[in-house]
Amino acid sequence: VVEKALEKGDLRALLGIYEASNAIFSTIKHEELFEIVMDAAQKFLHADECSLMLLNAEKRLYIAASRGLEQEIAEQVSLSVGERIAGRAAKVKRGYLLINGLKNYAEFEGISENSYIQSSIIFPLLCQDQLLGVLNLSRTTNKNNFTPADFRNSSVFASQLALAIQNAELYRTL
C-alpha cells in the first residue's frame, strides 16, 4: 500500500513537471514565460515564495519575476555572482536544498538568514554550462519542508527553464 502511494506521488510529481515543461515552452516572450514559471513554481513545486533571477549586462543577478515577495524588495535586489546564497549557487553552478535555515550549512556561515523561511531550493539556470540566472523557491507558510524528491523535480524544472529562457533570448535577438 505504501509503495503504491509513493508511486502515485511520484507519478503526480512527474505529471506536474511535464505540464510545467509544456507550459514554459509554449511561449517565447519573456514576460509570458516568467509568469508561467512563477505559476508553475507555486502550483507544482508548492513554493510559497519564488523568484527568477537573471544576469544583467553588468553580470549581476536581478529579480526578473517573483511571487510572494514585496515588489519594492524585489526591485532593489542586485547581487554579484558569489554573493549571498543565490550568488553562491550561480558561482559554483550547483543547486542547494536548505532545511530549517542556514545554521546547519557551514558554507553559508556569515550570511544573514530570513527567519520566516522554513526551507528553500536554489538552482542555477545553466545552458551549455553558461549561467543564465538562478531559480529560488521557498516555503514560508507551508510547514512541510522541501524533500530530496522536490529537489530532483526542481532540478528537471530548472534545466527546462534554462532552455526556455535561452530559446526566448535567441528569438529576441533575431
Image (cartoon, grey):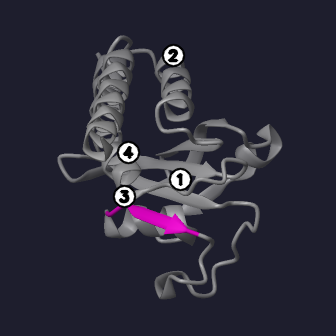
Q: Position of residue 50 (x, y in %)?
A: 59, 42
Between tags 4 and 1, which lies in front?
Answer: 4
Between tags 3 and 4, which lies in front?
Answer: 3
CA distance separating discs 4 and 2: 20 Å
Q: Quadrant of residue 27?
A: top left
Q: Is residue 92 above or below residue 58?
A: below
Q: Position of residue 105 (x, y in %)?
A: 50, 82
The amino acid beneath tag 2 is Glu
Local secondary structure at mark 3: helix
- The residue that disc 3 covers is 148
Q: Which mark is residue 32?
A: 2
The amino acid beneath tag 1 is Leu
CA distance separating discs 1 and 2: 20 Å
Q: Residues within 10 Å of mark 3 (few under 14, many from 20)?
A: few
Q: For this view, does 25 lie left or right of residue 100?
A: left
Query: Mark 3 or mark 1, which has the lower sequence index?
Result: 1
Q: Residues within 10 Å of mark 2 (few under 14, many from 20)?
A: few
Q: Nearer the viewer, residue 106 or 87?
A: 106
Residue drawn at point x = 76 percent, y = 61 percent? 116
Q: Quadrant of residue 166?
A: top left
The amino acid beneath tag 3 is Pro
| Location of the N terminus (image quadrant) | top left
Q: Residues within 10 Å of mark 1 (few under 14, many from 20)?
A: many
Q: Which mark is residue 154?
A: 4
Magenta segment range?
A: 94-99
Q: Is residue 62 above or below residue 20?
A: below
CA distance separating discs 4 and 1: 20 Å
The amino acid beneath tag 4 is Ser
Q: Which mark is residue 1?
A: none
Q: Which mark is residue 61?
A: 1
